Image (cartoon, coloured by chain):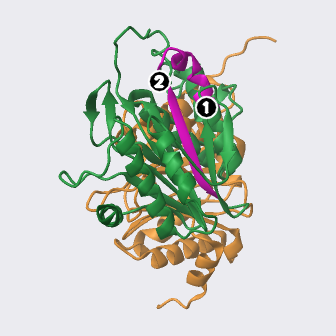
Amino acid sequence: MLPYYVSPEQMMQDKAEYARKGIAKGKSIITMEYADGILLVAENPSASLNKISEIYDKIAFAGAGKYGEFENLRKAGIRYADIKGYSYGREDVTAKSLANAYSQTIGNIFSQELKPLEVEILVVQVGDEGDPSELYRISFDGSIGDETGFAAIGGQAEELKVYLRDKYQKDQSFEAALKLSVKALEAAASQKVKPQNLEVAILDRKRSGRKFRRPSASELQGILEEPSEG
Amino acid sequence: MRSLFGDDLRSKLVDSSFFDLLQERRPDLLPRMGLSALEEKKGMEVPRGTTILAFRYQGGVVIAGDRQATEGFQVASRTIEKVYKADEHSAVAIAGVAGPAVELAKLFQTELAHYEKLEGVQLSMEGKANKLAQMVKANLPAAMQGLIVIPIFVGYDLRKDEGKIYKYDLTGGRYEEAEYYATGSGGMHARATMKKLYRAAMDEEEALRVAMEALYDAAEEDLGTAGPDFVRGIFPTVKVVTKEGIRDVEEERVRGIYEAILEKRRRG
């Protein structure tokens, strides 16, 4: 094949557009702080192909976009965290270093490989009582953002952010945070989300050891079906 | 291209095992490594943990161990931990050379959590027991040089709805025990006591009493094993695994059981 010239600028633009298109096809994911921890909510019709996962004691992961790609990233993160925690100490595994490793990896692939990753991920860490939680959002090009209160990824991330900006309240209850997240997802998709199509997980700082938990379907249904005040 | 994750995105790892991961990427972190080069010199002593036991009762399993580590005729530690929670429904106790034993417990804990996180489901009871056998087997070269670690693994099998006890030999052989088991330097004496006192349908309280009595006898007969230390307030570690999960038996309760045992023996 004849070598041809494409300006780096053009190439990056094309890659970004390609990645954005891929991500936009998937559903969005919200993460939100509440009084006792961090909530993660995704619309996910599959019960076995998870978008949200535990990484370490206080750290969770969520991925939007191409399942196979963020699944690889998720596994890499768990391996990284477990090796680090095993060779140093459990306290030494932090969302910050993990988010940086993700950012480097995704960024390198974006700039060096022909096809960029069509993913956007969240890495969140719940703080102990009194300590702040950390929410990191990493894009397809490796750019990393540090959010407070709530964050969203996926095709409708922007709409979700706009929706949540005025409605998010600090130190709200788990129930309120869950209802708000589901409402936001419904508003962005302009349709009802069935409870059985929700994937929900929390990092509960009140738990000892591993903070990650997936509330049961009946627990979720109970909360979502009770009439909300206002 | 190497990322900060190593060459993770192109890894050949297909298994969800942390043990295999370390073998591929960080063999220096494996318990046996570095130790295999160590030759046991005459008179070289390393701290050894002594007696551990497990006991099945109606609805669960008791697992316990004394708190002493011995170095020859010296006490190396009075407060060593030999019984570890492995996950929500299983526990492992390890006797033998203290260093690798503690490492093996930590590695096994990480192994179970690692699998659960990657796969999204827990390993079966059988799977957990097998994985531990492979780890003991991997320690064989070190064991041949005297650095022996022998675990007991217990858990509640949620699928079969019953408590389980697995014992191991140093080649990684894995055997299921239906009633009770004890190993370590005082293991023989503890087994003798449990053999006399075992009945099929015991409740938790009775099972705890037998387990404590067995440890007490082991401490009486074996120099390496420590009995209850009322002066310092050090008592054996005792955990119970049931359908509801694993829990520690509080020190107060263990103390109470020992006081009752001693009272009975004083009266003769």
Q: In this view, does B265 lie to the left or right of A107?
A: left
Q: Height in image: A91 above or below A87?
A: below
- Report the residue that reaches farthest toward the front: B268
Q: Residue sitting at 63 percent across and 25 percent down? A: B171
Can you name the residue that lies furthest to the right here?
A: A1
Chain letter for the residue marked with disc 1 in the picture: B
Residue at the spot x=40%, y=62% of the render? B249
Shade representing chain A:
orange
State the SS at label 1.
loop
Instruction: Please determine whether, in this image, residue A35 is positioned above or below residue B183.
Output: below
The question of residue B136 being in magenta is answered with yes
* Residue on which the image places disc 2: B29
Position of residue A212 measured from the top left corner of the image (x, y, whole percent): 50, 58
Q: Which residue matches tag 1? A: B169
Residue drawn 35% across the image and 38% down it: A92
Classify mark 2: helix, strand or loop. helix
Examine the structure image and report whether residue B232 is included in the region drawn in magenta: no
Give x and y (percent) for residue B248.
41, 60
Of callouts 2 and 1, the N-terminal one: 2
- Looking at the picture, which amino acid does disc 2 mark? Leu
Measure the alpha-carbon separation of dots 2 and 1. Answer: 23 Å
Q: Nearer the viewer, mark 2 or mark 1?
A: 1
Q: Residue at x 37, y 74 (%)?
A: A169
Label ID, residue B254? none
Please determine whether, in this image, residue B150 is positioned above or below residue B227.
Answer: above
- Whether B35 is drawn above or below B262: the answer is above
Query: Residue A38: x percent and y percent?
Result: 44, 62
- Start-end of magenta stretch: B134-157
Q: On the image, which quarter does residue B267 sit in?
A: bottom left
Q: Does residue B159 appear left or right of residue B26 in this picture?
A: right
Badge 2 crowding class, 10 Å Cα cut-off, few under 14, some 14 to 19, many 20 or more, is some
